[in-house]
Amino acid sequence: DTLYSENAEIKTDRITQDLTNKLEQYRKAKGINLTAEQEVEVTKLVGLVEKDYVAAINLPLLQSIVECRTNYLSTMMYLLPILILLVIVLCYFLLRMYHYLHRGLRFIAYAVISASNLMLAMAGYLMITKAYEDVMAEPEYYQSFIRMYLRWDINVFLYIGGLGMILALVLISFISYLKNRMKNN
């Protein structure tokens, strides 16, 4: 819930009850009788422990990740269309530079192949070396969450690189088709 900027409901009833029961058992085992003022102080102590528990559960790290994710998505909303437009313009000029369509597409295929190979090589290296395992954080659940998050991100880059290679194969096939059609005419 926190990753989607929603506040998760934290139920502390059981923890409060368990803590109160354990304090009561300890008091009875030691034969300690409390005054009314001391009972109020014990209740305050249980309330403070409950507040500390809720503060620890709220995961400040997740709040930071949510902020980064929100900033990243808002930046991408503007940057991605600009990049797509730039790619379209560059492809248009590249295709216009050459007299034959297959020549311009060949350079586009080269660019797609090199970009896909770079992405696959970097993501593959990170997956093989398990570089995400080097991340250290305390407590253990932070570390586990961060490692899993990084592994998922690396997998996304592997998929994008694979899709790029498939696109390059389609482009190469289309180039071959165009070239053969031109020779036959």
Image: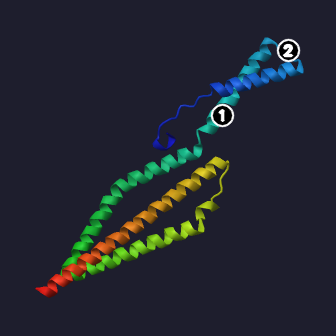
Where, quadrant-wise, is the C terminus in this rendering? Answer: bottom left
Residue 96 position, x and y percent, is 19, 78
What's the residue at 37%, 66% (across, down)? Answer: 163
Judge left or right: residue 37 versus residue 125. Answer: right
* 53 w.r.t. 159: above or below: above
For residue 184, what is the image quadrant? bottom left
* Inter-mark Cα distance, 1 to 2: 28 Å
Q: Which residue is mark 1?
A: 53
What's the residue at 45%, 74% (across, down)? Answer: 118
What's the residue at 63%, 47% (across, down)? Answer: 141
For residue 94, what is the image quadrant? bottom left
Describe the element under mark 2 as helix, strand or loop: loop
Q: Which residue is mark 2?
A: 33
Q: Amino acid at mark 2?
A: Asn
Tell which residue pokes out farthest to the left in this image: 185
Describe the element under mark 1 as helix, strand or loop: helix
Q: What label does residue 166 carry, if any?
A: none
Marked residue nearer the N-terminal end (1 or 2): 2
Judge left or right: residue 55 versus residue 43. Answer: left
Residue 70 position, x and y percent, is 44, 48
Tell which residue pokes out farthest to the right in this image: 31
Q: Amino acid at mark 1?
A: Tyr
* 4 w.r.t. 29: above or below: below
